[in-house]
Structure formats: C-alpha cells, structure tokens
Image (cartoon, rainbow, N blue to C red):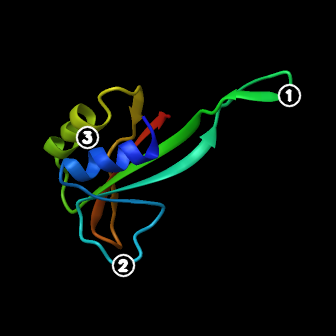
Amino acid sequence: MTLEELKNRACKNGFKYCYGVFLQDVKPPHLIAKRTDSNNFIADNKVYKKIEGIELQLTTDKISLELEEKIEDKILYDVCWNKTEETYISNEKVWNVSYFFEI
C-alpha cells in the first residue's frame, strides 16, 4: 500500500481523511495519517527498500466498534497493523484510536 492508496481507501469508505493535519475544523469521525519512522532495508550503504512507519488515527465523538471494524476490514485489510486502546480526550470531547503499520 502507498499513502495515496490509503487516502483512496479511506475516502472510498466514507471517511474524512488528511495527511498530517486538517487545515480547517473537521467534525468527527475522521482519519489522520502521519509518518512515524522508517525501517528501511539497507546494505552496502544503500537503501534497497524504503519502509515507512505510519500512524492512522481515528477520531470519533463516541466509541464505534463498527468504524474500527470498517477500517480494519476495508482499509487495512492487506497490511499487518497494531492498534491502541480507545483514549478519551476530555478537553476536545472526542475518542481516539491509532493504528500502526508499515508501507
């Protein structure tokens, strides 16, 4: 998967999506992607395969297992991912869950 494919899958499945940060206020639910690190395959001082760590953050105004399953089954179906537990951000009154994977 590429970042462009991630964007296309998110939008195709009805999610508001951006890479980095929304430039305007966007009501939940929405997805934000960002790079976290790289784990490139390197040998002989050369990068042979670029591997980017990605965090995909779901923000909702209430916990929704249906949305999480939609992300897992329709967007991240072909990548190995790990997920954080739901976290409530009280000053914004939203829930957050993040998916971590490599592309």
Q: Amino acid at mark 3?
A: Ile
Label 2, on which residue? 24
Decide which of 44, 95 is in the foreground and name it: 44
Residue located farthest toward the bottom when viewing the structure as drawn: 24
User: What's the CA distance linking mark 3 and mark 2?
Assistant: 23 Å
Horizontal placement of 35 versus 96: left or right? right
Callout 1 touching callout 2 (CB < 8 Å) = no
Q: Which mark is residue 45?
A: 1
Secondary element type, mark 3: helix
Tell me the crowding category of disc 3: few under 14, some 14 to 19, or many 20 or more residues within 10 angstroms, Cα based. many
Q: CA distance from mark 1 to mark 3?
A: 37 Å
Task: Say which element carries label 1.
Answer: loop
Residue flagged by tag 2: what amino acid is it?
A: Gln
On the question of residue 73 being in view, the answer is yes
Q: CA distance from mark 1 to mark 2?
A: 42 Å
| Circles 3 and 2 in contact, beta carbons < 8 Å | no
Q: Is residue 66 left or right of residue 32?
A: left
Looking at the picture, tell me which residue is in the foreground, 6 or 26. 6
Q: Using residue 20 as the reference point, say whether residue 67 is left or right of it.
A: left
Indicate which disc, 3 or 2, sits on the residue closer to the N terminus: 2
Say above or below: 95 vs 41.
below
Q: Nearer the viewer, residue 65 or 14?
A: 14
